[in-house]
Image (cartoon, helix red, strand yellow):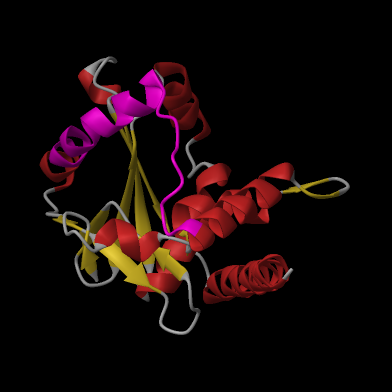
């Protein structure tokens, strides 16, 4: 594990398919791959060719989430009595250029993924009562890279009444789902490698 605070963390991610990018890399429409797959591939090609990480715009809602992540985990520890630890970058043991940086480590078998969304999104997740589907690919790749068994999904919004501020659901997929994610990651990276060779040899 490469600590997130270390100078090696960001350079180690350059050109890699990471868990935060995985949903975009495998997204599909009714007619085929979504545009996000090509966008992700081009970003990674650019990183490999330049050695610099792609820049991503951080809007106010995203900054809100970053600013309140630590508070979310403090509330989680208070609510559950379970202590968490900061994580770092885990590279997949057998898939080159594939890694994940979970938000937290929980015990020996668990991970933690927190979101601090808009209030309307937070309420929607509470009403639905399940782990949001759009974040499941990210968590599947986290499990694949770390070898852990489950992810605690945590949504936090300090703007609502205290009893509704924390939404917690555990994501514990079957082993087959993690293996499917690994297959898709290998396929994406193989395609990326072919494109890289084609461009650099042109």
Is residue 25 part of the magenta span, yes or no?
Answer: no
Q: At x 28% / y 51%, what residue is drawn?
A: 103
Residue 71 in the image: above or below residue 110: above
Q: Position of residue 187 (x, y in %)?
A: 68, 72
In depth, the one of 134 and 37 nearer the eye is 37
Location of residue 25 by image quarter:
bottom right
Q: At x 66% / y 74%, what residue is drawn?
A: 190
Q: Left or right: where does residue 118 sit relative to residue 114? A: right
Q: Left or right: where does residue 104 sit relative to residue 137? A: left
In depth, the one of 200 and 114 nearer the eye is 200
The magenta-colored residue range is 50-75
Q: Position of residue 169 (x, y in %)?
A: 38, 46
Q: Quadrant of the C terminus?
A: bottom right
Location of residue 188 by image quarter:
bottom right
Q: Quadrant of the N terminus?
A: bottom left
Magenta stretch prevailing secondary structure: helix
Residue sitting farthest toward the right: 31
């Amino acid at each position: 594990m490469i600590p997130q605070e270390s100078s090696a963390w960001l350079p180690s991610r350059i050109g890699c398919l990471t868990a935060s990018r995985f949903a975009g890399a495998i997204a599909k429409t009714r007619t085929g791959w979504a545009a996000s797959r090509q966008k992700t591939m081009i970003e990674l090609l650019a990183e490999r060719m330049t050695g610099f990480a792609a820049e991503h715009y951080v809007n106010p809602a995203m900054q809100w989430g970053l600013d309140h992540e630590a508070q979310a985990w403090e509330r989680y520890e208070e609510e559950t009595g379970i202590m968490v630890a900061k994580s770092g970058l885990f590279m997949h043991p057998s898939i080159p250029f594939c890694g994940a940086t979970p938000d937290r480590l929980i015990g020996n078998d668990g991970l933690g993924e927190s979101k601090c969304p808009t209030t309307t999104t937070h309420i929607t997740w509470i009403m639905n009562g399940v782990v949001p589907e759009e974040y499941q690919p990210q968590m599947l790749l986290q499990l694949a890279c770390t070898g852990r068994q489950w992810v605690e999904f945590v949504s936090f919004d300090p703007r609502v009444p205290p009893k509704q501020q924390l939404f917690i659901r555990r994501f514990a997929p079957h082993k087959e789902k993690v293996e499917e994610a690994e297959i898709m990651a290998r396929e994406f990276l193989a395609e990326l490698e072919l494109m890289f060779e084609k461009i650099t040899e042109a």
